[in-house]
Amino acid sequence: MSSPLESGPEPFPRQPDPEPFPFPADLEPCQQVRREVDIDAAPEQVWDALATEEGREAWLEPDPERELEVEHAEPPERLVWWWWRGDEQPRKVELQVVAVPWGSRVIVTESEPQFPLPQLCASFARSLVLA
């Protein structure tokens, strides 16, 4: 006697995998880097070092060309900022602070969006001028 799994048609036949999205040659998917570090300090102390200008001055190299704009903050657990220098593509940084028995774990995810926003804006500017 055969088992029900060995006989009969599959209840849900496997579908072929979809074709990958065809990115244009000059448009790459978002590059993302994720890192973790454990710190021997309470989450509130780590939060202050990340979320305040005074705290960042203690560990982040001074750079007069660097711009930093906070997008979202959920003290003391999650902080999202964008940073860039001059004409560089802005990078999104998400910082998560997680309490662990020995202190805090900081999870950093940095993304460099590759969508050509300046070209999109410029195309509308041209169409407004031409219209």
Image (tube, grey):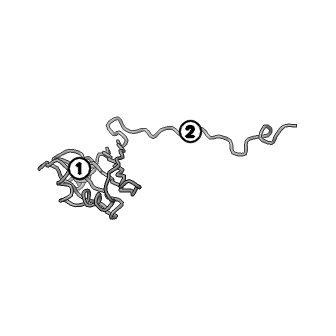
Q: What element carries label 2?
A: loop
Question: Please, what is the three-letter code of the amino acid marked with disc 1?
Answer: Ala
Give the residue at x 35% y 39%: 28
- Residue denoted by label 2: 17
**Which quarter of the picture shows residue 104?**
bottom left
Is the N terminus in the top left, top right, bottom left or bottom right quadrant? top right
How far across and down, in percent of the image, does residue 51 sit? 25, 60
**Which quarter of the picture shows residue 35?**
top left
Residue extending farthest to the top is 25
Looking at this view, is 97 or 109 the one in front?
97
- Residue 122: mark: 1
Q: Distance between the residues labelled 1 and 2?
A: 37 Å
Residue extending farthest to the left is 64
Label 2, residues with CA under 10 Å away: few <14, some 14-19, many ≥20: few
Give the residue at x 37% y 52%: 105
Q: Is mark 1 on a helix, strand or loop?
A: helix
In the figure, is residue 50 to the left or right of 18? left
Is the C terminus in the top left, top right, bottom left or bottom right quadrant? bottom left
How far across and down, in percent of the image, does residue 10 sit? 73, 41
How far across and down, in percent of the image, does residue 52 sit? 22, 61
Looking at this view, is 84 or 33 the one in front?
33
Looking at this view, is 73 or 9 the one in front?
73
Give the residue at x 35% y 35%: 25
Label 1, residues with CA under 10 Å away: few <14, some 14-19, many ≥20: few
Contact between labelled residues 2 and 1, with CB atoms less than 8 Å apart: no
**Which quarter of the picture shows residue 81?**
bottom left
Give the residue at x 17% y 46%: 87
Looking at this view, is 93 or 24 the one in front?
93
Question: Please, what is the three-letter code of the amino acid marked with disc 2?
Answer: Asp
How far across and down, in percent of the image, does residue 84 sit? 21, 49
